[in-house]
Image (cartoon, rainbow, N blue to C red):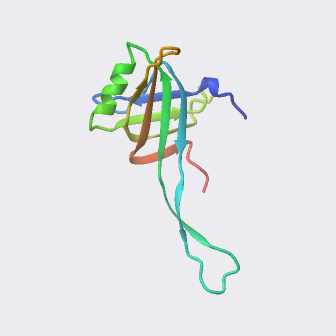
Amino acid sequence: MRRHGSKGQVKWDPPGGAGGATVVVGSLNQWTLDMARDKEDVTCFGDTNKQYVLGLPDIQGEINGIWDEEESPEFLRAALGDVPVMLELVPSSLTPTFFFTGLAYLDGSLDCAADGAVTISSKFVAAGPWTMEPPAVP
């Protein structure tokens, strides 16, 4: 079933959180997840085209939203810290059992323009294994 992005969610268990219980991060409005894999050229003499083998996925992405004085500071504190957070990226809250999750290190950024809303963004990279729920069929 196709879904509209307006029902997407970012959940997290912040540093010092409940240890696995994720909660929705408010005032966010966009996320991306890049799962690009290393590709090594294994082309040999006599091959009729290039051939490759796949390496590991390089899990990383970006989260964006609007500055919220009650919630955004905690997100930025995590970005300034050395402890990874548990992220859960949900494409649609209408199908809450389908999501991507794993430990991530966060970066943080604020954008404050005189002619717009104060926005917050974060780039993240994997700090441990990531999974897709339900698991992908091999």
The residue positioned 34% from the left and 20% from the top of the image is 73
The residue at 49%/45% (across/down) is 131
Which is more toward the observer, 88 or 61? Answer: 61
Name the image quarter holding residue 83: top left
Horizontal side, residue 104 vs residue 62: left or right: left
Above or below: residue 40 compared with residue 130: below
Work out which quarter of the rendered image holds the C terminus and state it. bottom right
Q: Quadrant of the N terminus?
A: top right
In this picture, residue 2 sits left or right of residue 78: right
Which residue is pictured at 29% across the width and 32% down the height? 80
The picture places residue 36, in percent across and down from the top left corner, at: 54, 53
The count of marks equals: 0
* Residue 52 x, y percent position in the rendering: 59, 70
x and y percentages locating residue 16 in the rendered image: 27, 29
Q: Which residue is at the far bottom? A: 46
Spot the residue most to the right: 1
Q: Is residue 31 visible?
A: yes
Q: Is residue 5 above or below residue 72?
A: below
x and y percent of residue 93 in the render? 59, 26
Query: Is residue 94 visible in this depiction of the protein?
Result: no
